[in-house]
Amino acid sequence: MNSEKKEQIAFRLDESLARQFKAAIALRGEKMTPVLIRYIEQYIEESKELESK
């Protein structure tokens, strides 16, 4: 069992951008949360690479 604490993050998007995002993930058959987590993890890794330069 994963005992790591979870934290909820909320933010606001323009309505048009939110609709486009929802449509894009639906077309791929994905869910919003895993997609956002993947992008956040990617962003963190890219930031680490920039710090090491």
Image (cartoon, grey):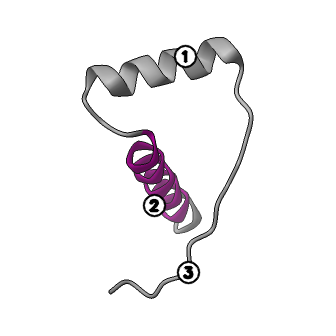
Which residue position is annotated with label 3? 5
| SS at mark 2 in the image | helix
First in sequence: mark 1 or mark 2?
Answer: 1
Q: Which of 34 and 50 is in front in this view?
A: 34
**Distance from Cα at disc 1 to Cα at disc 2:** 28 Å
Residue 35 vs residue 48: left or right?
Answer: left
| SS at mark 3 in the image | loop
Which residue position is annotated with label 1? 19
Q: Which residue is pictured at 44% across the width and 39% down the height?
A: 32
**Distance from Cα at disc 3 to Cα at disc 2:** 21 Å
Q: Which residue is pictured at 33% across the width and 24% down the height?
A: 26
Q: Mark 1 packing: few (<14 Cα in 10 Å), some, or many (20+)?
A: few
Q: In which quarter of the image is residue 45?
A: bottom left
Q: What's drawn in magenta, residue-wise?
A: 32-49
Which residue position is annotated with label 2? 45
First in sequence: mark 3 or mark 2?
Answer: 3
Task: Please say whether residue 45 is one of the residues in the magenta stretch.
Answer: yes
**Cβ atoms under marks 1 and 2 closer than 8 Å:** no
**Cβ atoms under marks 3 and 2 closer than 8 Å:** no
Q: Which residue is pictured at 50% across the width and 15% down the height?
A: 20
| SS at mark 1 in the image | helix
Spot occupied by residue 10 in the image (x, y as percentages of width and height): 71, 48
Measured along the vertical axis of the image, is residue 7 above or below residue 34? below
Q: Which residue is pictured at 25% across the width and 26% down the height?
A: 28
Evaluate whether residue 53 shows in this view. no
